[in-house]
Image (cartoon, rainbow, N blue to C red):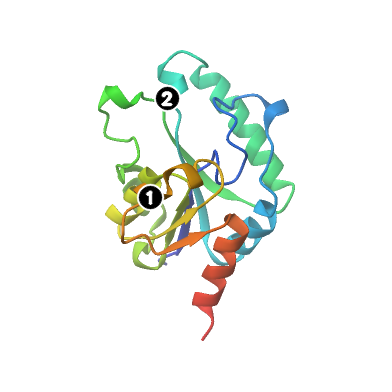
Amino acid sequence: MVHKAVFLDRDGTINEDIGDLYTAQKLILIPGAIAALRYFAQHFLLFMVTNQAAIGSGIYTKQQFAQFTRHYLDVLARQGIQIQKVYCCPHRPQDACLCRKPSPYFIHKAQKEFDLDLKHSFFIGDHPSDMEAGIRAGLKSIYVLTGHGHKHRKDIPANTRFVARDLAHAAQWVQQLARP
């Protein structure tokens, strides 16, 4: 069975972007994010795709990231939200890896692992690299103005499908698209 998916950036899209987030005490979800994620979870498989250069820079370890991610997913699960998988690029931009957004590497990996219909799927994020990754993979890309959104709005690709105030607004737009 082929599934539709929503790929989500983490920092600035679901939670406040405080920079180098890896401790549970600093996790602050953006208002409306839980309701939006609940809607998405009813209609799509959910995936998180995040660049975490702080790992490659030695600010925190892969183990600390994994521990924080377990906490993060538990917080969402208690709200009835299941993230199928978290894909993390731990490299710095200068490392020239294959997996760092704007590369669609993790989107294609998820497509193979979960039998996804990318044509009817979405990427939501607050950075032009999120839009670029989604567009390169053939997803409908939604740019949110939370996090770094306002700062980089002029830099988003022209074929970004929608600019939303936040994740809740993005969910409203997706819901309107689904109406007959």
Using residue 147 as the reference point, say whether residue 88 is left or right of it.
left
Along the polypeptide, which appears first: circle 2 or circle 1? 2
- Can you tell which quarter of the image residue 159 is in? bottom left
Task: Find numbered disc 1 in the image and state the secondary structure of the residue it sits on.
Answer: helix
**Residue 69's spot in the image, x, y percent?**
59, 33
Which of 93/49 is in front? Answer: 93
Position of residue 71 relative to residue 94, above or below, is below
Q: Which residue is mark 2?
A: 53
**Residue 83's spot in the image, x, y percent?**
57, 48
Cα–Cα span, label 2 and label 1? 24 Å
Q: Which residue is mark 1?
A: 154
Q: Callout 1 environment at 10 Å: few (<14), some (14 to 19), or many (20+)?
A: few
Badge 2 amino acid: Ala
On the question of residue 115 being in view, the answer is yes
**Residue 77's spot in the image, x, y percent?**
69, 47
The residue positioned 52% from the left and 62% from the top of the image is 44
Residue ranking furthest to the top: 58
The residue positioned 49% from the left and 76% from the top of the image is 177
Of badges 2 and 1, the one in the foreground is: 1
Badge 1 amino acid: Lys
Task: Find numbered disc 2 in the image and state the secondary structure of the residue it sits on.
Answer: helix
- Can you tell which quarter of the image residue 152 is in? top left
- State if disc 1 and disc 2 touch (CB < 8 Å): no
Position of residue 77 relative to residue 95, above or below, is below
Res 56 label: none
Which of 164/64 is in front? Answer: 164
